[in-house]
């Protein structure tokens, strides 16, 4: 689908995968920013084009990308083995758990199923994994995030406007807080926007009507959430498959513990590394402690990017053949997204 996009649509996708203005009528300053970059467009046309991109499936949604971890609860990555002759049965058993938000088949001789658990109570992780092990007869390997070096998930396309356009400074000044919990009103807002904003000229006002709040409060709260890290960014969230990013490689590395803190930021600098974490090893089964997710539009592009990561790794330690691997995704088994209802509700201030 990406080759069917015109130059203006490409400019919009590149400009606004983050940094969209949080103001009552955001398409006006957004269009003005594009005009300054040489793209002749007004607010009405920008709105229409974003609507069409969404309807065509080029966008997964428009709005705020919420940082689930900052909202409440926890999520963890889990690996397991599913025997080939019972693979589909294994899938059904794992996916039947509502706590499983994502599940992928990946290329590995043993750990060929990888899923994400999202729970309101951290104690629930062990409970769910115990249940899954009992149902499948296979051991699970919990790989919780120990350090996060980067979460970006931005997917540029070739076009006239290749740099992000950050208009997030528009609107009211806000003061971040260090409060972890949510008020009941903030909970209503999170649940309303977690699937995206309405693609209208006044999306924040429409959200305000939906939850019975003032538009000014909605704008200020979303902008404050962005400053606090509860919202990672506001903008167009692309469907990377529709943009041609079909190669999904999870590169894993056995990085010496004494250089992990240096390696993490260095690998996170690559714009094609969408996620970058330190996770625990599992002795005798899983020797890798560093994960860097790459995406490419072809096998050749993906391989080239992985080699760039390898070269950067080699600046910090002597990388052996057994010190790394790439697990390509071969099948999406479940992708419901991390729904925040239970996690956010458990994090509400009780008055």
Image (tube, grey):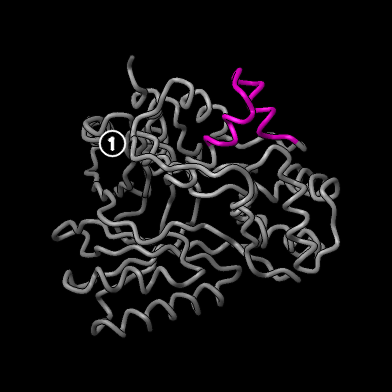
Binning the other alpha carbons within 10 Å of mark 1 as few (below 14), some (14 to 19) or many (20 upward) gives many
Q: Position of residue 111 (x, y in %)?
A: 31, 54
Direction left: furthest residue: 283
Write down the region rendered in magenta. Answer: 202-221
Of residues 318 and 73, the one drawn nearer to the viewer in this rendering: 73
Does the rendering let one see residue 333? yes
Q: Position of residue 317 (x, y in %)?
A: 24, 82
- Residue at 35 percent across and 69 percent down: it is 265
Q: Is residue 120 left or right of residue 139?
A: right
Quarter holding residue 195: top right
The residue that mark 1 highlights is 136
Instruction: Please name whichever residue, 303 or 28, is drawn nearer the observer in this view of the structure.
Output: 28
Is 295 displayed left or right of 198 in the figure?
A: left
Main structural element of the magenta stretch: helix, strand or loop? Answer: helix
Residue lying at 36% horizontally and 39% vertically, measured from the top left: 90
Which residue is depicted at the point 33% across and 35% down?
A: 180
Q: Quadrant of residue 296?
A: bottom right
Image spot of residue 140 (x, y percent): 24, 44
């Amino acid at each position: 689908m990406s080759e069917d996009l015109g130059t203006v649509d490409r400019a919009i996708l590149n400009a606004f995968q983050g940094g969209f203005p949080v103001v009552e009528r955001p398409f006006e300053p957004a269009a003005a920013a594009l005009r300054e970059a040489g793209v002749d467009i007004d607010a009405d046309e920008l709105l229409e084009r974003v609507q069409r991109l969404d309807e065509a499936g080029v966008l997964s949604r428009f709005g705020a990308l919420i940082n689930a971890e900052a909202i409440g609860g926890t999520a963890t990555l889990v690996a397991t083995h599913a025997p080939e002759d019972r693979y589909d049965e294994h899938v059904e058993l794992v996916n039947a758990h509502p706590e499983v938000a994502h599940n992928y088949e990946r290329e590995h001789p043993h750990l060929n199923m990888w899923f994400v658990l999202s729970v309101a109570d951290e104690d629930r992780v062990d409970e769910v994994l115990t249940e899954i092990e009992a149902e499948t007869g296979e051991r699970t390997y919990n790989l919780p995030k120990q350090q996060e070096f980067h979460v970006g998930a931005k997917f540029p396309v070739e076009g006239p406007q290749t740099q992000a356009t950050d208009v997030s400074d528009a609107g009211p000044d806000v003061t971040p807080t260090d409060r972890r919990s949510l008020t009941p009103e903030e909970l209503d807002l999170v649940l309303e926007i977690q699937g995206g904003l309405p693609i209208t000229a006044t999306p924040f006002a429409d959200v305000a009507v939906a939850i019975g709040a003032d538009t000014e409060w909605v704008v200020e709260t979303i902008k404050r959430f962005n400053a606090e890290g509860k919202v990672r960014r506001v903008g167009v969230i692309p469907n990377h498959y529709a943009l041609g990013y079909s190669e999904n490689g999870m590169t894993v590395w056995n990085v010496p513990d004494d250089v992990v803190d240096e390696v993490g930021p260095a690998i996170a600098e690559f714009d094609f590394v969408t996620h970058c974490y330190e996770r625990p090893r599992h002795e005798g089964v899983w020797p890798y402690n560093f994960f860097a997710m790459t995406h490419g539009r072809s096998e050749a592009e993906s391989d080239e990017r992985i080699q760039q990561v390898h070269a950067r790794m080699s600046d910090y330690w002597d990388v052996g053949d057994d010190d790394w691997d790439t697990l390509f995704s071969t099948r999406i088994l479940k992708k419901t997204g991390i729904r925040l209802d239970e996690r956010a509700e458990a994090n509400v201030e009780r008055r």
